[in-house]
Each structure stands twice: as structure tokens, then as C-alpha cells.
Image: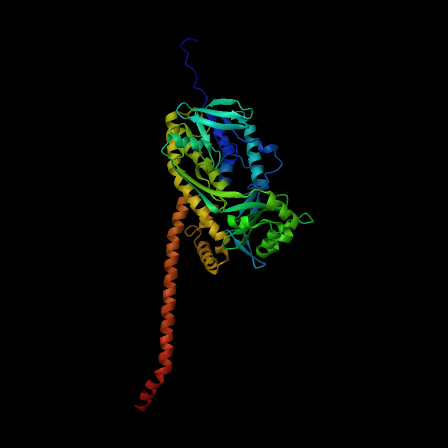
Amino acid sequence: MAGQQQPPKEYTVAIVGGGLVGALNAVYFAQRGWNVTVYELREDIRTLKQLGGRSINLALSKRGISALEAAGAGSGLFETLIPMKGRMIHVGGKLQAQNYGYFNEAINSVDRKLVNEHLLNKIQNMSNVAIKFHHELLSIDFEKKIINFKKSDGTVYKASADLIVGADGAYSRVRRELLRVTRMNFSQEYIEHGYVELNMPPTEKGEYAMDPNHLHIWPRQTFMMIALPNIDKSFTVTLFMPWKKFDAIKTREDLFAFFDEKFGDSVPLIGKELLVKDYFKNPKGALISVKCKPYHFKSSCVILGDAAHAMVPFYGQGMNCGFEDCLVLDEILTKYIGKPGTATSKRPSSELIGKALEEYSLKRNPDAEAMCDLAMYNYIEMRSSVTKLSYKLKKSFEGFLHRLFPEMIIPLYTMVSFSRIPYSKALSIHRERTKSYDFVGKLVGYTFAASAVGLGAFVALKNSGFKYLHSIACNK
């Protein structure tokens, strides 16, 4: 009809990457009434039997759980979690338990494939979400908001969207495209250690071979092995060590000699033949840490998860941090365009989206980079510090204070894994507290040393001089 105003067009989102973060982001965006298309390079993970050799296990804790709950995406997944209340340290053929928290907190072992399948199933049942597999990103025109993909048959597919989201992992192609149009600071670091995944099957009776409510660690100073439980009563075992050690193991005899010396108690539980099969068949993975900023370009694009901040896996926060990205972004979007379901949220202006993305970059980057640093630090703790008396004493002392003042003195691990205190704030608190502990430690040391010197002088004086003084006093 002439002169009739056209209704505002639907807001569209293209998410590059159908993994954990991309799928959860799709849930959040779809709940705002946006039309979402997820483009994934690989085949549908739900058609694969397993993901052998690549990060089968993940640890889900407070931040990830909060993000799933806020999206209404936890039901059906939380029931599969296996709580791990602490570390079980394997040293010298003996076991020693070290709790993670002080009030019965636990992190949760969960299967990566199961989480991804759960989220894909959820978005597939949402009427305003489409999923396209076998779509390889070629290029992006951020000004025109056009994305070019190559399909599995070699043809080029052109898509457009109001918002382009990069959730395509540590080697993100969306980030690569952003580097061309933004003054983005970018760094990546490979550590001198790799990893290989092994499998510890259930016992002959179909039970767990070890306590399933602990994360098992074999710390060996410069390298380590860990094991996390699976719902099928097996454990996924991951060996982390310098590449030169991997290179030195060339035959099954080399492997047996190495494991018998370093991880002797694990060999009967894994089984020699399965150990050989997994070690030589499964790929040896590299470990990379990525930092960059900003995370956005105008109102056109934003990157999240490993695309923005890949981290080494030693704090169990990769998935949790990525999921919290989705939650933080949603909270900021709500601040600028309103809650899901409102008119301003369903059809937002580019100006408000741009402001929200800018705030997201500014707010999230310090936290993500702090977590990257903490993850790197925790490798040293896991492979070495956990066996040292000084570490155990400090942990006991801090735990004592935390029980006395639970809201005032919060250990670093508790802040990171069992709260939503921003990572950067947690790291800052930890550094200041460490200075205080070091000062108190030195003060106690100096006091002890001074007391020892004074006591020694007193004993010497007593032995050599008190008798003489006593004899003079008696003569008087």
C-alpha cells in the first residue's frame, strides 16, 4: 500500500564456528529473537563416534555453569557431570589427596563431545537458528557485512549478516580477517611442551580403576600426567612433557621403560598393549597461548572464546572462560538494548550494538589475558609445586584463614573456579596477598633467627660467665 511504512527488518547474526562457544552464543542470540546462522568448517560432530586424541575431557566449574544456566541450556547436561573435589597426587607409589575448596566445592569432569552435541541439539530445535556444516571461511568485508565461504563441493557461498561472530578457535580465520582492518595487538606463544591422550579402561568388573571424584596427577617436576573420569567408567589420561622427551621415545621398549620409571602405578591400570596403541597412534598436540585486542570492529564483528584468548589447559578454564564470554556479552547487550524479548533488543540499532561491542572489548580483555597468564602459571604448580612442603604449608595457612573469614580471605583457586570474581581482579588480589604472605614469612623468619641468636648467646653466657658472676656474689 502506498505510503505504508515498512516494518523493521529482522536482525541477523552469522556465527563462524559451531563448537562450544559458537553454539552457546547461538542460544543467547536466538533468545533475543535474532535470526542466527552457524557456519562450521568441519562435519557435524554428532555423526562422529568419538574425538580420539583431542581434548576429550573438560572441567566445568562456576563460570561455565553460570553461563549455561543463564541461557537455560544446562538441563540434560548437568546430570552427566562427574564432580572432582580435589587432586589426587601420585608420588613414590603413594597417593595424597588435596582438596580444591574448603567448603566441599568441586569442579566437574565432562565430555567435550557430549557438551557440543547437547548445545547443537538445543539450537537445532530453535526455529530462528540454522546450522551449515562444511563451510570454510574465505574472506569478510566488514563494511558491507558480507562473508564468503567455500562449500565442500568447491563452490563459493556468499552470506550477509548484521553481526559477524568469530568463535572459530585458536587459529581463527575471523581474527585473521580482523587483523587486516583493525589496529589489533596480537601475540601467540607456543610452550616447549606437547601432549598426547591415552585411555584407562574400566576394570574387568566394569568399575573405575581409580577414585573418580578426584583429578589424578602424576607430577614429575618438568612434566606430568593427569587423568579425568568419564561417564563410561574409563579415564582420559593426558601426558604433558617437553617435545624432546616425546622425540626420545621411538619404540615400545622405550615407552615401557619410560612409564615403568615415571608412572609405574598407571601401567597395570592402562594395560601395556593399549598404552602402546594410544601413545603411537594418537596425535601429539601443541599447546598455544593467544592474546589480542580489541575483540571487535565497529558494530560488524566480535570474536569470543579461543578466537580471542586461547590458553593452555592447566587451569581447566578454557571452556569456562569462553562460556563466560557469552554471558558477559549478553549482560552488556542487555545494558544497551534491553532484555531479550523487548522491541529494542529484537531489532537493535547499529549504534547501540557498536557501543556494546566496544564495552565488551574493554571489559573482557583484561580478564581474558589474566586467565591466560594464570593458566601458564598453573602448569608449574601442577607438575612441581604440589609436591613441595612450602606449597602445602601455604595452602593450609590460607585455607585456615579462609574458613575464619570466608568473605574476606579467598584463595586464588576458589576465586577462579568457584566464583565469578573477574579474573583480573582475582589475579591482582592474589599478587597483593602473596606480597603480604612473603612479608609475614620473612618477618617470622627474621624473628626466629633473632630468637635463635639470642638464645644461643644466652646459653653461651650462662655456660661461661654465670658461674664466675655467681662466685663473686658468693664471696661478697
Q: In which quarter of the image is the N terminus?
A: top left
User: Could you say which is closer to the camera, residue 208 or residue 82?
Assistant: 208
Residue 192 percent across, percent down from the top left: 47, 47
Q: Image quadrant of residue 277? A: top right
Which residue corresponds to the image point at 36% horizontal and 73% vertical from the top-left? 454
Residue furthest to the top in view is: 2
Vertical relation: 473 (above or below) 207: below
Say whether residue 418 is visible: no
Which residue corresponds to the image point at 36% horizontal and 65% vertical from the top-left? 446
Residue furthest to the bottom in view is: 475
Q: In which quarter of the image is the C terminus?
A: bottom left
User: Could you say which is closer to the camera, residue 46 or residue 419?
Assistant: 46
Residue 344 percent across, percent down from the top left: 41, 25
Position of 95 with respect to 422 (left or right) is right
Residue 369 percent across, percent down from the top left: 41, 42
Which residue corresponds to the image point at 44% horizontal and 19% vertical from the top-left? 9
Residue 318 percent across, percent down from the top left: 49, 41
Vertical relation: 327 (above or below) 476: above
Say whether residue 377 is visible: yes
| Colour setting | rainbow
